[in-house]
Amino acid sequence: MPEDLSTLKGLQELFSNDWAFAAAWTHYLVFDMVVGAWIARDAVRLQIPWPLRSLALLLTFLAGPVGFLVHLAARMSLKRAIAVDDQPQAAQA
């Protein structure tokens, strides 16, 4: 086990072990698949526009948590927009 995982050399040492590399790669693929599937279903359900949905999925595949955060930001802004639209307008005197 490498002494310092905060350096590139330490990470290279860790991933030189075939089992550590296989575990990390599996974790990476499973995260992308599970989170991407959830983003896809959730975005369709909330009717998030396809360009934003596609951006979130692409970023999830390429940069994992970044894509997930993009989707969460879109989701929150959409929910706020819906909540504002659903509020009754104040009666004018």
Image: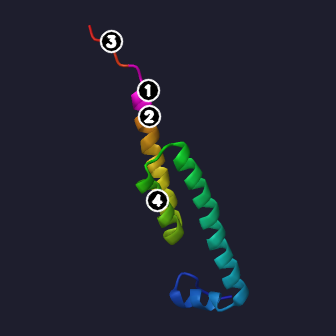
Residue 40 location in percent, x, y?
A: 56, 54
- Taking the view exactly as shown, the residue that stands out farthest to the top is 93
Q: Earlier in the sequence, mark 2 or mark 3?
A: 2
**Residue placed most toward the observer, 1 or 89:** 89
Q: Earlier in the sequence, mark 3 or mark 1?
A: 1
Relative to 33, is 78 above or below?
above
Residue linked to disc 3: 91
How far apart are the two marked residues, 2 and 3, measured between alpha carbons?
A: 20 Å
How far apart are the two marked residues, 1 and 4, measured between alpha carbons?
A: 27 Å
Relative to 50, is 27 above or below?
below
Residue 15 location in percent, x, y?
A: 63, 87
Q: Earlier in the sequence, mark 1 or mark 4?
A: 4
Q: Are marks 2 and 1 in contact (CB under 8 Å)?
A: yes
Q: Is residue 2 left or right of residue 48?
A: right
Tell me the element at label 4. Answer: helix
x 61%, y 58%: residue: 37
Q: Is residue 62 left or right of residue 12?
A: left
Residue linked to disc 4: 54
Q: Are marks 2 and 4 in contact (CB under 8 Å)?
A: no
Q: Earlier in the sequence, mark 2 or mark 4?
A: 4
Tell me the element at label 1. Answer: helix
Residue 30 location in percent, x, y?
A: 66, 68
**What amino acid type is highlighted by mark number 2?**
Ile
**What amino acid type is highlighted by mark number 1?**
Asp
